[in-house]
Structure formats: C-alpha cells, structure tokens
Amino acid sequence: MKIVKILFWTLWRIWFYVLVTVPIILLFPFLFLSIVSEKTYPQFFVLARIWAKIIFYGMGFRYTLEKEAELEKGKSYMLVANHTSMIDIMLMLMLVKDNPFVFVGKKELAKIPIFGFFYKRTCILVDRSSSKSRFEVFKRAQKRLEQGLSICIFPEGGVPDNENIILDEFKDGAFRLAIEHQIPIVPMSFGDVKERFSFTFFSGSPGSMRIKIHQPVDTTGKTLEDKKEIKDKVRETVLSQLLKWDKNKKAL
C-alpha cells in the first residue's frame, strides 16, 4: 500500500507541473502580448485566472466559499491570506474576479523555467534579505495602486518550515502599504490547503478546501501608529477561523 501511495504522489506531483507549464506554453503569444505594456495588465489577469482554474480543477481540487462581504468592482484593496501551499496563488486568482491585483512575492520564484518569465514581469519581487529591495517594493506597489490595481501579499512572509504552525507571525509590509494608501485590507482564511497540497512531496490528495473572505478592515484616517493594532486584528481574524475549522475537523 505504501508503494502505491508513493507512486500516486510522484505521478500527481509531476502532473501538477505539467498543468502549470503546458497552459503557459499554449497561451504564450497571448500572455506575451498582455505584458508588453502595464496598461494591458487586466488582460493578463484574465489569462492568469484561466491558468489558475486549469491547475486547480485539473488537480482534482474544489472549494466551498463563505463571504462576509462583496468586494466593490474596480476598487483597490490589500488582499491578505494565510500561506501554506503553492495552491494559494491559484486560489487567490480564482477568488478575486473584478479587482485585478498584483502579487508581491519572493524573487526566488523567478528562477522557475517558463513560469518565472511571466512572474518577474508581472509581480512585485522582493528580496527579504535586502532593505533596498523592500523599499523598492513600496515604490512599485504605489505605482500599481495609482493605476487602480489591488495588491496581494501573504503577510507571513513565506510558508512556515514547520507544518505544525497554524499561522505564523505577520510582517508589517502589507499593513504599512494599506495605511499609507488608505485602502481596505481584505483578510482571507484558506482552510485544508496544507492537507491537500503542502510543500512535502509525498503528501496530499484531491478534495475540497474551505475558504472564507472576511469583512474588509477599513484604514481610512489611520496612521502608521495604528499599524500594529490593524495587523494584530487581521491576524486574529484569520487565525480564529483556522482554529475553528481545525476544532470542527477534530470533532468529526
């Protein structure tokens, strides 16, 4: 039985990378044209959402969604969620339809063949070991917000090495940006994603995930002195939901 599981996991993980790569190759001319100018980013965003759906459903995943509020079409938001899997990227693209956004992500992902070509040209890359790089993030994010786009940041700053950690501490960046630009912060809780597709190679399975989009947190009139309070509030919102799901799961 163990050999069967290992074989399944191996083929399933290979299939994931096939799903990531092949649609990019097939859509390459359209993707390339959509990144020639920053003005055509919304068109790229539409193609990225198609790519995300192919991967998500092609892997045998599905999700149930609970919303506390609807996002206002065309409005800029700071989108934040817990981060445990590569699937988080696909989920975020699928969940947010009418508010094209730009990811802020680590520069290492730009090294991935084919995917990295578009990643480094459409996302805001950050080298977390460089203070200069972190400053550049704010400048590029400001430009994107002025263009009417939203920003997505996974505020844990990466996936925790210890998979037993339910939610790591949040970094300041997302909350500083949101306050400086007076845009609402939208907390999201992604449940069951770690169990379905973690970074551990021999693990996971097709199945359902639970998603909750929480009430946006207003930053109007807030200053950087309020940053910690807002950050703690958002983290507590996400953590409370994750703990609730975890408790319900154990009770079954």
Image: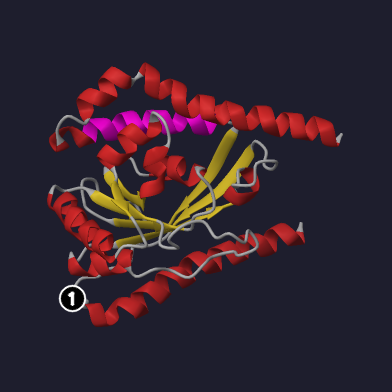
> Residue placed at 41% from the left, 57% from the top?
154
Image: magenta residue range: 42-57
The three-letter code of the residue at mark 1 reads Gly
Q: How is the image coloured?
A: secondary structure
The residue that disc 1 covers is: 221
Residue 226 pos. (x, y %): 28, 80
Residue 205 pos. (x, y %): 67, 38
Looking at the image, residue 74 sits to the left or right of residue 10; the answer is left
Q: Is residue 52 magenta?
A: yes
> Residue placed at 54% from the left, 44% from the top?
64
Q: Residues within 10 Å of mark 1 (few under 14, many from 20)?
A: few
Seen in the picture, residue 17 relative to 216 is either above or below; the reply is above
Is residue 133 or residue 29 the one in the foreground? 133
Residue 44 is drawn in which quadrant? top left
Q: Is residue 71 visible?
A: no
Judged by its main secondary structure, the magenta piece is helix
> Residue placed at 59% from the left, 47% from the top?
199
Which structural element holds mark 1?
loop
